[in-house]
Image (cartoon, grey):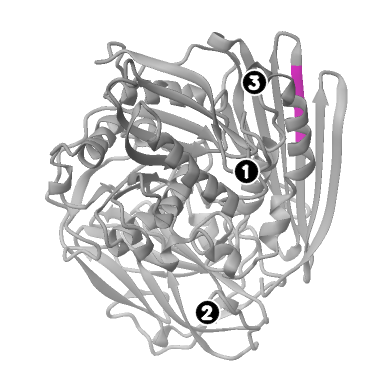
Amino acid sequence: MKIDTDLPRLVRELPHVEIPMPDGTRLAARIWMPDGAENAPVPAILEYIPYRKNDKTLERDAARAPWLAARDYAYVRVDLRGTGESEGVMEDEYTEFELADGCDVIAWIADQAWCDGGVGIVGISWGGFNGLQLAALRPPALKAVVTICSTDDRYADDIHYMGGVPLVEQLSWASVMFGINTLPPDPAHVGERWRDMWHRRLDESGLWLDTWLRHQTRDAFWQHGSVCEDWDDIEVPVYAVSGWADGYCSAVFRLVENLRGPAKGIVGPWAHRYPHLGAPGPAIDWLSEETRWWDHWLKGHDTGIMDEEPLRLFLQQSAPPRSHYASREGHWIAEPSWPSPNVTPMVLGLGADGSLGGDADRSGAPLSVCSPLWVGLHGGKWCSYAHPGDQPGDQRRDDAGSLVFETAPLDSDLHLVGDAHLSLRCRVDRPVAQIAARLVDVAPDGTAARVSYGLLNLNHHGGHAAPATLVPGEEMSVSLSFKHMAQSLPAGHRLRLSLSTTYFPIAWPAPEPVTLTVLPAASELRLPVRADAGPRLPDFAPPRSGTPLDVSFHEPPRSEWRVGEDLDTGRIVIEIGDHEGAATIEPQQFYHSAEGKERYSILPSDPASAEGEVTWIHEMSRDGWRVKTETQTRMTCDAEFYHIVAKLRAWDGATLEREHDWSVSIPRDHS
């Protein structure tokens, strides 16, 4: 990472600015702007998220925002209502309140003396989501969007459900926000109000997992904020960014394909990170690329960015399977549109002998599989953060519990760019069932690397809005889509299609063990094949940023992923640790620490044995002020219900200020 210490303009930082909302609530902002902007107004860039502008994101923001501000932008980092130093309570993601506030914030920014009236919005993850959602509401001052690691579809392509299958990531993410929602505002900025603001958050933020599990189908709850419901709502230019290890890579393709306004997309090798912090590498000089976008749309400068092809992809080379990569080999390619004329479908038949190809033997008997519940153990996380263990490892054990179809060794390199589709004629022996399908790159030595995958709740095969109980033994035709990819398989490798009836701990298992029977003669796999791997585009420049924040770490950030197996019962246990570090932010002498622990376990033949538990401990202090919060969420199930037990504890110094408990059971709706 190149550190730019000599910025082209002096930058002024306003650590705490309060923005009034129409109902009297005040939202907190941290603003960086070029010195003298009040007399020479500049465009503004808004980032609008719940992750606390004074501490949790400050290290990242301090290396990014001044860099952009020095190039004649005002960077405005706003905490959502009920987070950080903002007043109010946050009760869920992307609420009507959040979006209405966002429109009011944009109008307030545009009206400031230091702003020339033009505003762009940028964000990764939550901020990428609400950037699209705010664009769909068309606030007049909003001129352009950069959306990173986000989605257009809150139901089918987010941490909640995938193909109608409940994701274990939903428990993980709900627990993250459960912890963040317990954190108080900083008394240094809000004074004695901090305690009342804190108490209200502790008492009123609620248990989000309960809410999400009560919406197991694509209903109005998920349609709200899903911009794919009406693409024409977004008229401003959008730059969409993601990575192959991220959970949200497919949204980039849909946005480029469907938005009627100017749209660009880029997908690198990265996990859920900004591209200049991208891992697996190579990271890129994203700040310069982003500035080209803003200069074009907020300043009217001809930067050449819109003369380039709209979709840029990192075509990954085959790599041995690892649960963590420092970097991936490959090169950049471009597509003139999506769908691309460079990509054509290749149809492979499923053979009754386990073959996969145009000449597969399709005359034999149906094939069946009832997967043990440890299949999925090597799947990593739905959304990788480039932590050790959270990307898919060697697939051979998972494949041992799956129904597999495999090509002969490839005669030449195979370049897969886009989303594959599986058309399956099948039947099951239970009224509720799911299927996981994986594309696997099998090397000559037998090692097996996952290239892409998809999930489908078979009760949703007619649509996600109105699932139906399956009739055991009755044949059905289903279509399953895989996550997008850009991957080269070299000659001599094989492509494997692996089908399983479970995929834990990515997917919560169906209520009963299921036997899936596939009719190969009536099934096929459609692959997106690029004729060649070129032309090769020049690499981006290496990453750069502004001067890092002065932070002293008492404990460095660390993560771990451990898998254990009880050889008597067969119970598999996955333990994940995520310590964000214990650190003091030196300029404000603010100490903060956050540590999360996740534990998932299951018996090999009993879906009702599935368990998940996540705890988070947060601590903050300064000059004798000290708070600590602990949250714990435990999820179990039986054949009819999901069960949630949750606890919240909050201390002011040694005094236990709040203690809340939840215990709820939620009916399973065809899941």
Whichever of labels 1 and 2 marks the residue nearer the N terminus, that label is 1
Is 529 left, or right, of 159 in this rendering? Answer: left
Question: In front here: 241 or 400?
Answer: 241
Instruction: Answer yes or no: is residue 150 visible.
Output: yes
Q: Main secondary structure of the magenta part?
A: strand
Helix, strand or loop at mark 3: strand
Q: Which residues are magenta?
A: 626-630
Q: Nearer the viewer, mark 3 or mark 2?
A: 3
Question: In front here: 251 or 412?
Answer: 251
Is 517 left, or right, of 265 in this rendering? Answer: right
Q: Quadrant of residue 186?
A: top right
Helix, strand or loop at mark 1: loop
Q: Where in the figure is residue 201, as x and y percent of width and height? A: 73, 38
Q: Nearer the viewer, mark 1 or mark 3?
A: 1
Q: Which mark is residue 461?
A: 2
Q: Which mark is residue 592?
A: 3
The N terminus: image quadrant: top left
Report which residue position mark 1 lands on.
23
Mark 3 and mark 2: span between their CA atoms?
47 Å
Whichever of labels 1 and 3 marks the residue nearer the N terminus, that label is 1
Question: In front here: 646 or 400?
Answer: 646
Q: Which mark is residue 5?
A: none
Q: Where in the figure is residue 605, as x and y percent of width and height? A: 72, 65
Is 311 left, or right, of 308 in this rendering? Answer: right
Q: Amino acid at mark 1?
A: Asp
Q: Quadrant of residue 197?
A: top right
Decide: marks 1, 2 in contact (CB < 8 A)? no
Q: Amino acid at mark 2?
A: His
Q: Where in the figure is residue 524, as x and y percent of width and height? A: 37, 79
Decide: marks 1, 3 in contact (CB < 8 A)? no
The C terminus: image quadrant: bottom right
Instruction: Answer yes or no: is residue 447 visible.
Output: no
